Image: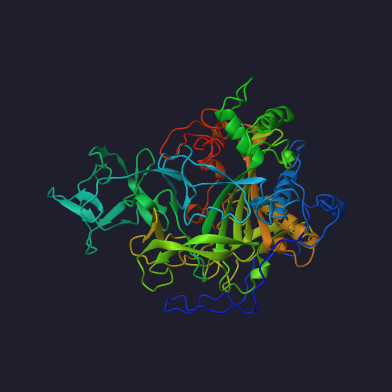
Amino acid sequence: MNIKNYVGSQKKARCLLTALALASLCQGANAGTTLPTNVKSTCSFAPQEFNVIFASGSVSKDGGVLPADSFSFASNTFCPFYKWAEQMFLWVTSPAPSGTVGGPHVFESSIFFAVSPTDSDNKRSLIPAAPGQSLPFLSSISQRGSKGQQVVFDSKGKVHDVIHPAVGPNGKLLARDKAGQTVEIERVQAAPDGKPLLLDRTSKQIEFQGTPGGAPILFSDQGTPLALRPETVLVNGRPRLVTTSGAVIETEESQAGGGALIAQNGSLVFYLLQVNDVWGYFNTGMDDNKITNPVPSTFPTTGGALNQITTVAQQAPEPFTKSAFPDNVAMAVEIKSSWIETTGLANAGDYITIDATIPTYNPPLTQPNNTQSVQSGTKRARLALVGIHIVGSTLGHPEMLWATFEHVNNAPNPQYTFTTTSGGVGTQPPDGPGGWLFSSTGAAAANPNNQRIAPNGTTLNVVSGQTIGPSDVVRTAPWGTGPSDPSFTINNTDIVSLNQNVKGLLAAGDARRNYLLVGVTWVKGGSPPSNGVKVGTPKLANSTMETFFQPSNCFDCHSDDNGNMLGTPSGSDGFSGGLSHIWAAMRPLYH
């Protein structure tokens, strides 16, 4: 069975011209991340090793791949972690095996459940795969902290909680001038010495009442004084006031904790959450007190744990009864993926694609100078995969391995270094402009990764001063490691060499050759993230999912609750702590 990749009826895409300053929604020539050809091979599959991960025992175009054996996972180096991730990606995007129902790929089949959005009770549901069933795509993505709180990341990659202050009639911050009069703050700037400057709507500097150190005096939305630092931090390209405890002052509710993104072809990015059957029955068994002695505080990592979950599935009522898990060696798996419409893509056959029902908006998102669009209905569309997170538990790693992949045409990389075949240090120059899905420029964009759209329920609003449209995106840490990290060159070399290796081993015409491993992160020794050493590629982000949260690390937001890696059900989004932000909010499959 072959991966069902959509091939357009014409090789040249029809351009959708609008009066937008986009000039054209057509992705004419593919850009594509360029990998250095002289990278030293420090991480790779041997040809025969790669052959045996295919179900048939040999590489074939669009051929089915087996899940990585997380039961027997062991490693003394970083490379096996990266190879685990590659195999898992090839597996979830493989043809669905015989005996399953649902769509043509593994991730669309009955091996996986789709995850619903939160309902009015802040609960989620597991949606079993079924023939012809449309998956529950979301038009925005939520980014929450380890306790479910709203967070933002500053330009240095530091995570900050968010505080909402008292605002004026126009929704702006309120300060008091020297005369004691309340004044709305139109925007915040940073003075040369780093201290905050507050400007009114006429761009006149406000002579505010402040502390001896130079910090303005503001009040929370509860009326209590806020202790501020006499400095600002840069968030989404704009200075923000920050409290002495490190929380960022944010006035627009929807700008903190998430955002929406539009590609250069005019498509909104749609997101999908899924978990595998082991994850789903484990969650249900825990809810029904079927898994005890002891009660787990982590996702399964051993055969004994899996046996208990299998018993839950075998004793489940119809139609949920399962005699065994076809993917049992994969352990518990959670995936998050990002998709765009294929309209305007130069060659949709270069992507893994699916048919889906997605929301429509009025006015259309391509309308010039649009500042608000409201969901008006739905339509059937062909979607192309542009990014995917794959998270899974393995032997010795209850904190799970966190991997992410992107399409080669997504976004430009800045300059990075790597080890060459001769043992020297090579420099890969920054990617230039031309044909990127998420950038009209190259890596030298003057002010990249700035959020333009602030979703609020079914309404897409704009960030102040913006209109609805594409953002220019740059992958700030090309292969998941920052340039100041001592392992920058070493990590880049491992990831790049494995990407080159896998691309060379996959059959010509296999769409999976067009997806790149960005990196993998985990905790040394499998410790809880809150007190462990994060290793692998520690500044891991996906340019389509953590677009406005770069640089960052998965464990900045996904952590344990005092050692409990599953977390507890509380908080505004149905969870408090825990690696998975959907675990504690999940309704059981059955009662």
| Image coordinates for residue 161, horizontal then vertical, percent | 41, 42
Q: Residue at x 43, y 76 (%)?
A: 21
| Image coordinates for residue 101, horizontal then vertical, percent | 68, 50
Residue closest to the eye, 166 or 326: 326
Q: How is the image coloured?
A: rainbow
Name the residue at the top extreme.
293
- Can the viewer see residue 464? yes
Q: Residue at x 64, y 19 (%)?
A: 293
- Can the viewer see residue 488? no
Residue closest to the eye, 52 or 448: 52
Q: Residue at x 66, y 29 (%)?
A: 315
Question: Residue 408: which quarter of the image?
Answer: bottom right
Q: Is residue 206 left or right of residue 417?
A: left
Q: Is residue 141 left or right of residue 307?
A: left
Question: Residue 460: which quarter of the image?
Answer: bottom left
The quarter in which the C terminus is drawn is top right
530 above or below 388?
above
Name the residue at the left extreme.
179
The quarter in which the N terminus is drawn is bottom right
